[in-house]
Every structure is written in structure tokens, then in C-alpha cells.
Image: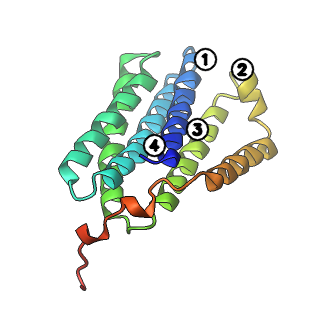
Amino acid sequence: MSTGLLLFFIASTVLFLCYYLVIVQNRHESQMNLMMTAMAGGMTAGILFGTIMGLLLRGDFIQSTILGIVIGMTIGAFIGLPHQLITTLEGMLAGLMGGMMGAMIGEMSPVGQEDTLLKFLFMISLIVLVITTRMFHAESKSIIVTFLRNPLIVFLLVLFVFFALEQVDTFFPDNQIDSSEHHSVLG
């Protein structure tokens, strides 16, 4: 496993811990907002980690799908757990769907484009987290939510993360990709 991929796993784990903390801090708020947060966290986790499994286990679609589903459902359940059972179920089902879609994305992605795809999906997950966090701005007294009310700060945060991801070493070095395993329809 490359250093870039390890850093990406750590950053993704921190991202989904933030989803969990949003629900923990706002667990007395609207049921619909909390279910939406669990669904967003489970879905983005499933897509992101399912894609990673699809890329790492390219050629073994069944195993990558199962692992993507299990990881997505686990993270979705973890995110929804602090509130109610229905929120946990919402996170799990969204993680299931995201894990399946992520494995398909990873399996079908062109060789050499893995880094771009993972960076794009991470940025989408971050933007969804920020928007989800802003959902609670009317009800919450949290410093983080107050901080994220300013669109300029949100834009600078996303821009900073984008440039930080661009500085990270490649997730899948060229020597780890065996292009002889991948067959082209035309060739």
C-alpha cells in the first residue's frame, strides 16, 4: 500500500468521524435532519470505500462489492447509532447502496485515472458534509457550525483540502498497476 493511499484512508476516516460528531452534537434536533445526515454519511462512505475496494481488487468484482457493502453499511450504522434505530437503518441502507455503486465505479474506472477519481469522490464527500452541517445552523450553538456559516470560509476550506490532496503522493503508483490483467474490447 502506498503512502498516499494510507493518508487517504486516514483522511477518509476522519471525514466520516465528522459525520458521526455532527449527529452526536445535534441528536436532539429534527429527526429528518439526522436521518439525512446518516444517509449522506453512509452513501458517501459506501461510494468512497467501495470505489477503493473496486480499484484494489480489480478483476474480482464479487469480493470488492461485498467488501464495499460491508464497509459502507458499517460506517452508515456507526454514523446513525447515536440517535435512533431508524436513523441507524437509514445509514446502513445508504451504505449498502453506496458500497455497490462504488465497487462498480472502481471496477469500471480506466487504468491510470484512479487518483483523480478518488480525489473527486473525497471532495464530493467533503462538500456533502459541509452542506449537511449547515443544515443545523439554525438550531445549533456549535462553534464548528457557526464557523461554517460563512460561505467564504467554506470555500477556502474546500480549496485548501483540494490543494492538500493534489500535493499527496499518488494513491496507486504505476508499478502496482498490472495492465496485462486488463483486457480491452478493441484489442
Count residues near mark 3 (Cα–Cα under 10 Å), then give few for <14, some for 14-19, many for 20+. Answer: many
Q: Quadrant of residue 107?
A: bottom left
SS label for mark 2: loop
Mark 3 or mark 4, which has the lower sequence index? 4
Report the disc number at residue 129: 3
Q: Give, as a three-letter code, the residue at label 4.
A: Thr
- C-alpha distance separating marks 3 and 4: 9 Å
Q: Give, as a three-letter code, the residue at label 3.
A: Leu
- C-alpha distance separating marks 2 and 1: 8 Å
Mark 1 or mark 3, which has the lower sequence index? 1
Q: Give, as a three-letter code, the residue at label 1.
A: Gln
Circle 3/circle 4 CB separation < 8 Å: yes
Q: Give, as a three-letter code, the residue at label 2.
A: Ser
Q: Which residue is mark 4?
A: 44
Report the disc number at residue 25: 1
Q: In x, y percent, where is residue 96? A: 30, 39
Q: In x, y percent, where is residue 139? A: 68, 22
Give the residue at x 33% y 32%: 73
Q: Is residue 90 visible?
A: no
Residue 50's place in the image compared with 71, above or below, is: below
The one nearer the camera, 70 or 36, is 70
Mark 4 or mark 1, which has the lower sequence index? 1
SS label for mark 4: helix
